[in-house]
Amino acid sequence: MKFDNIIIGGGLSGLTCGIKLAEQGRKCAIVSSGQSAIHFFSGSFDLLSKVDGKEVKNPLEGMKSLASNHPYQRVGLENISRLVEEAPQLLVRAGLNFAGQADQNHYALTPMGVMKPTWLTIDDFSRFFHNDSFPWKKAAILNFSGFLDFHTLFVQDGLKKFGVETQVKNFAMKEFEAIRRNPSEMRSTNIAKVFDRGIIIDEFAEKVNELSKGFNVVILPSVFGLFNKNVTAEIRAKIDKPVVLVPAIPPSVPGIRSQILLRKRFEELGGTYFLGDNVEGGTIENNKLVAIQTNNHGDIKLEADQFILASGSFYSKGIVATREKLYEPILGLDIDGEVEDSEKWLDEKFFNDQPYMHYGVKTDKQFRAMMNGKPIENLYVAGSVLGGANALKEGSGAGISLLTSLHVAEQLLK
Amino acid sequence: MKKEIFEPFNISDNNFEQCVKCTICTVYCPVLEVNPDYPGPKQSGPDGERLRLKDPNFFDESLKLCLNCKRCEVACPHGVKIGDIIQMARIKHSKKKPKVRDMILANTDIVGTMASTFAPIVNPIVALKPVRRIMDGVLKIDHNRIFPKYTGMRFETWYRKHAEKTQNDFKKHVSYFHGCYVNYNFPQLGKDLIKIMNAAGYGVHLLEKEKCCGVALISNGLIKQATKQAKHNVEAFKKSIVEKKMPVISTSSTCIFTIRDEYPHLLGVKNEEIRDESELATRFLFRLIDSGELKLVFKDSYKKRIAYHTPCHMEKLGWSIYSTTLLRMIPGIDFMSLESRCCGIAGTYGFKKENYETSQGVGKPLFDQIDNSGADFVSTDCETCKWQVEMSTTKKVEHPISILAEALDVEATMKLWQE
Ligand SMILES: Cc1cc2nc3c(=O)[nH]c(=O)nc-3n(C[C@H](O)[C@H](O)[C@H](O)COP(=O)(O)OP(=O)(O)OC[C@H]3O[C@@H](n4cnc5c(N)ncnc54)[C@H](O)[C@@H]3O)c2cc1C
Ligand code: SF4
Ligand code: SF4
């Protein structure tokens, strides 16, 4: 089966890359062994929140002090300042509205009740511009009885620090009795599916209006609009007070909606998305990857002119570590990191910057994967499978995924 | 540490240990969406397995609500075989004996043989309202269910009479696993396949004696019988694939899925020697076309708008691309892909009175999509999906092979390889 481009991995970077290439008329396929990390999104895409443990106000400025092997430095800060404009536009074309600026982080309220600096926030959520105060004096925190994935006490504690008076109120609705019967499945996505049907929105809004009398703002868990993306706006319109949604414990409703809409956009552009299929190996001839083998397709190989590896980091098994070995499992590509010496992978202090978090597939300047010290001419690497950053510590996960994949797509389109 | 001390507690055939509790699987389970009595894939699968390994009393009969659609497995980022864990738990621990009804529904070949023998009588009878009421009351087969019609002349009989003689005229050969549906209910699909394969230059043969793949036996807990039939089929496949060097193709996605993946995994029947060369006809044809060995020529006169539905087992196999690529090759087809969703019937599941509501609830979003699609008809590779969609929507359903057969210019296609 022949495509122009095949992308390994269907997470944020694989999808962004695929959409950009398909928009330029390339015949693309994405192969993904399962759903991706987007399902856990807090609803905010981080660009750069911290450098050396210190908060960054202006990510574009902050990038200047990153190490030279950091993915942002390797993309080039000039390219970055262009691509940060392109990324949100690509998301908008997929039906996802994110707001924020690359030269000024804003804050998002986390499930722990703290303000976290970030780059782009999806329109479900509120953006804040101070990390020590909240624009409202009295907040009603509402939750569904029996919903355990929204920790109202954390939010309440957090808001107290900002000098906000709060009250937590739990309430029940008939429609949720059924899900509550099932002890393990009173989860965000199941609640969202009930709202998706549209029948309880009015009743819900009425309840919220009643319970929030005397407060300036209503705080609710983000459980709206899974398959039906209009639900959030509809609910907001029916509630009298300003509504602040706070992420619940993952999987996240806006995250899953994002995954669905990105995939849909890719497919509408003519892309082929193979879900639940694992890439097991590839055929390399004269420093070129000519085809990949997958679990489902067996002897029918998937061929392409160019390939992109966007298989994620340790969590998604784009990189694997066993007791003795740290490796890239599909082709055995070179790894940037202390692969030989497992002693050096970890810092014994758990909260320190862990060396292994910086490990990833080694590439040349053009982001082509290296194997035995030589670049594979038509295999590019994007997203969190690249080394050189500790996305968790820096708050740079989505930024790296979006920007390296757009950059790689540009290399391919040259 | 002695290994045997730990074995009974820690070792599972299925990889439930890989589960990281992310609950992504529960987002995509179609049953959970409509029936809150079902504990969901994570709870029924890896979580429950952990408990059941310690004590089988943790088994819960509500696991029977699982459709075995495997959509949870397709979504799981960690490759946990959730559907298999659940199916295996039912096989091992369910204390409820299969009911008479389940035996009737599961024994598609015995019932098929009887019903097709008396087809002129059986068809009108099972279509009668009072009879359906009785089946509902006595057998708990929902009265809303419309039974597939049985044929008067079985496919095997037709084949021996009309097709067998000419098949040796070809240079290349395949065997055809037709399955119960083609044999007892819808021989036309088998005839369509022979038409295409012959046009492509392949003689089509039957296996020495095929038995029902056993999928319905497995889902109804008749494991001994299923295992026996699986062993029989693997031997029959070996004769064709290993001895005669003839690959086996089929038109039923569920039969092929069962033979390739459920035989070794659920029944412990080894199939390595035959697995790679047991596949769907559409995949076989795709390979020939993709490698340049075959070209199909289509009539210009065929013009249709077709909506393709991906059956659950095609989603799991990842093979719908083969069927859809073939369909898209037909110049006169206006092709649209339906969103991949379960239709809710899941073989015999949807026939049972206790599941009827769940079954239709699961299928509802798909039915709506189909009714609003503006398509002339729906195409899909699974026979039970066909029953379900035809019963629950305004559209007819055609197998991709039948569509290809109708659109194919047989003579022009043959000319290309005869030259
Ligand atoms: C739990 C979690 C939560 C996060 N939340 C945030 C957040 O809120 N904000 C933020 O900015 N960043 C967040 N991040 C950081 C995150 O890593 C990036 O933002 C981004 O999602 C990574 O995208 P990716 O496409 O590179 O990788 P992934 O999303 O990991 O996708 C990789 C994909 O490749 C597939 N794959 C791997 N191997 C194979 C193979 N052999 N064959 C086929 N497919 C394969 C995997 O199945 C997976 O779907 C989070 C990360 C994790 C792990
Ligand atoms: S999706 Fe897989 S890993 Fe996640 S909870 Fe379900 S079985 Fe476990
Ligand atoms: S196999 Fe289908 S019905 Fe069963 S748990 Fe998985 S997704 Fe749900």
Image (cartoon, rainbow, N blue to C red):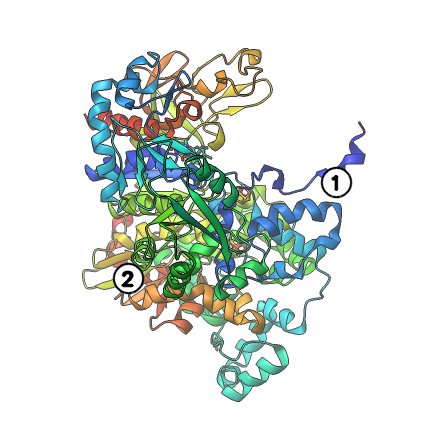
| Element on which disc 1 rests | helix
- Within 10 angstroms of label 1, few (less than 14), some, or many (20 or more) residues? some
Q: Is residue B402 left or right of residue B69?
A: left
**Dot 2: chain letter:** B
Residue A357 seen by the camera: yes
Mark 1 falls within which chain? B
Q: Position of residue B373 (x, y in %)?
A: 28, 64
Asked whether B228 or B265 is in front, the reply is B265
Asked if badge 2 and badge 1 are on a common chain, one would say yes
Q: Is residue A220 among the parts visible in the rendering?
A: no
Q: Residue at x 57, y 57 (%)?
A: B208
Which amino acid is tagged 1? Phe
Mark 2 close to ligand 3, CB under 8 Å:
no
* Vertical comparison of A65 with A225: above or below: above
| Circle on res. B306 | 2
Q: Give the residue number, with chain letter if any, for mark 1.
A: B9
Does the numbered disc 1 mark a residue whose Cβ is under 8 Å from ligand 2? no
Q: On the image, which quarter does residue B215 sit in? A: bottom right
In the figure, residue A335 lies in which quadrant?
Answer: top left
- The local secondary structure at tag 2 comes to strand
Residue B275, above or below A366: below
Q: Quadrant of ligand 1?
A: top left
Calculate the distance from the C-alpha at mark 2 to the C-alpha at mark 1. Answer: 51 Å
| Towards the viewer: A375 or A36 | A36
